[in-house]
Image: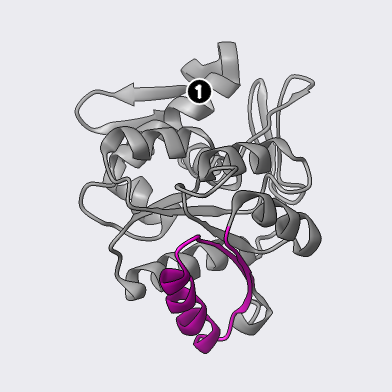
Amino acid sequence: MTKKSTMSKILIVEDDPDIRELLRFNLEKAGYTLFLAEDGEKALTLARKHSPDIILLDLMLPGVDGLEVCRTLKKDPELQRIPVIMVTAKGEELDRVVGLELGADDYVVKPFSLREVVLRIRKILDRGERQTAPSILKADPLVLDLDAHTARLDDQFLELTATEFRLLTYLLRHRGRVQTREMLLDRVWGYSFEGYARTIDTHIRRVRKKMGEAQNLIETVRGVGYRFQAQE
């Protein structure tokens, strides 16, 4: 059963009081429980205290900036699985890549559409709340435990973000079949927006790096997309 939105907690990290209030008003109206932070230090304090279900994170913050906040979150075992949507005026491709490399689950550029922000929040929360039957996926030497939400290579656990885990799970479930970037964006992220296919390449690169010598299990199909190696 999916949780009601009223049970979902969102941490808004934004130093602009007008944007912070705009997000607060609309998300509160949508039924979410909100926590507000105007700087990075307060954001980390509130994240540790309340364990929000999702974090909207501005990058250009006073003191501890958004990139450092994201880096700190993703290194903390208690917080690293909290989805992060970066909301920022820095919309260049390099900025997106840096944010995604640090473990952000999504990236929204200012000025933004409130409908788009709410859609992305709902998609991420819906993915996290959806329950699946007990299942173990294996592709030697990789083992995914969907109940425990763990990934192991031989006896070593991989430290994957929530999005990386979903991406690897989807590829393994459909092993041997080519998945285009557009398909992965739709099936793993739950939406399709022009220009966001590069998100897939960034996440694939991060997952491969974490898989080390087993990274060749994820094959690149040039000009098409990606495929998890077929069963031997």
Q: In this view, does 170 lie to the left or right of 44?
A: left
| Foreground of the two, 140 or 110 | 110
Q: Residue 229: horizontal and vertical position, in percent?
A: 46, 24
User: Is residue 230 visible in the rendered structure shown here?
Assistant: no
Above or below for 105 versus 224:
below
Q: Can residue 169 be seen in this view?
A: yes
- Asked if the magenta segment contains residue 63, the reply would be no
Look at the image and tell me in which quarter the N terminus lies. bottom right
Which x, y percent locates residue 121?
48, 67
Residue 18's quadrant in the figure? bottom left
Observer-nearest of 169 and 229? 169
Residue at (51, 49) in percent of width and height: 61
In this rendering, position of residue 84 left or right of residue 86: right
Residue of label 1? 208
Q: Which residue is drawn at 60% across and 42% down?
A: 64
Note whether 55 is above or below 230 in the view shown: below
Residue 21 among those drawn in magenta: yes
Q: Where is residue 138 in the image (x, y as percent from the top left)?
A: 65, 32
Q: Give the range drawn in magenta.
A: 9-38
* Neighbour tally class for label 1: few under 14, some 14-19, many 20 plus, Cα within 10 Å: some
Q: Identify the element where label 1 is drawn.
A: helix
Please tell me whether residue 195 is drawn above or below residue 11 in the rendered image. above
The amino acid pointed to by label 1 is Arg
Q: Which residue is at a point 45% across and 82% down the rendered structure image?
A: 26
